[in-house]
Image (tube, helix red, strand yellow):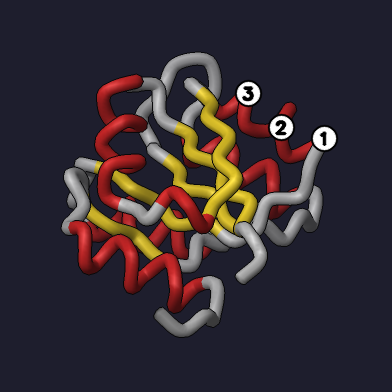
Amino acid sequence: MQKINLLIVDDSRISRRQILSLIDTEHFNITECANGSEALEQIAKQDFDLMLLDLLMPVLDGIAVLQYLKDKNINQKTIVLSADIQIATKTEVMELGAKAFLNKPPDKGLLNSTIYNVLSLTE
């Protein structure tokens, strides 16, 4: 299996470490960013198969990242991971192009199955 280029965007180093502990890291080339601005810089430099995106971050938040990608017609597969459980927020991120929305902290099985489903892979 070819390694999957994965971008993890979360201002919390602890959250990024938690995500890494839940996924099978041997199948991924992982890049980490602490805010949306860093994420957009990385997306401009490299193609990512998938982005795991937090919403509440300094500098540039997850909603702004999704809006930018949509405005520029950049098709970046994205799973949003957020503690924000409002229906309006979930609806907004899906309308902006996210493929899935998972509550933080994500369940290991649900996170992995969602990753594989979004990438259309079999586990």
| Spatial separation of the CA atoms under disc 3 and disc 1 | 13 Å
Q: In which quarter of the image is the N terminus?
A: bottom right
Task: Please state the horizontal and vertical placement of residue 50, each as a whole percent of the image.
Answer: 57, 56
Task: Please state the horizontal and vertical placement of residue 106, each as a whole percent of the image.
Answer: 21, 52
Q: Describe the element under mark 1 as helix, strand or loop.
A: helix
The one of 92 and 115 positioned closer to us in this rendering = 115
Residue drawn at (59%, 38%) of the image? 65
Task: Please state the horizontal and vertical placement of residue 38, each as a whole percent of the image.
Answer: 63, 23
Residue drawn at (46%, 84%) of the image? 122
Q: Residues within 10 Å of mark 2 (few under 14, many from 20)?
A: some
Q: Which amino acid does label 3 sit on?
A: Ser
Q: In this view, does 27 lie above or below 109?
A: above
Residue drawn at (36%, 70%) of the image? 114
Q: In which quarter of the image is the C terminus?
A: bottom left
* Numbered marks: total: 3
Image quadrant in which you'd find residue 53: top left
Residue identifier under label 3: 37
Q: Residues within 10 Å of mark 1 (few under 14, many from 20)?
A: few
Q: Which of marks 3 and 1 is nearer the N terminus?
A: 3
| Spatial separation of the CA atoms under disc 2 and disc 3 | 9 Å
Q: Describe the element under mark 3 as helix, strand or loop.
A: helix
Tag nearer the camera, 2 or 3: 2
Task: Please state the horizontal and vertical placement of residue 67, each as a whole percent of the image.
Answer: 61, 45
Q: Is residue 26 above or below residue 19?
A: below
Q: Which amino acid does label 2 sit on?
A: Gln
Residue identifier under label 1: 45
Tag nearer the camera, 3 or 1: 1
Q: Is residue 11 left or right of residue 2?
A: left
Say if mark 3 contacts mark 1, CB within 8 Å: no
Say if mark 2 contacts mark 1, CB within 8 Å: yes
Could you say which disc has been placed on residue 42 in the image?
2
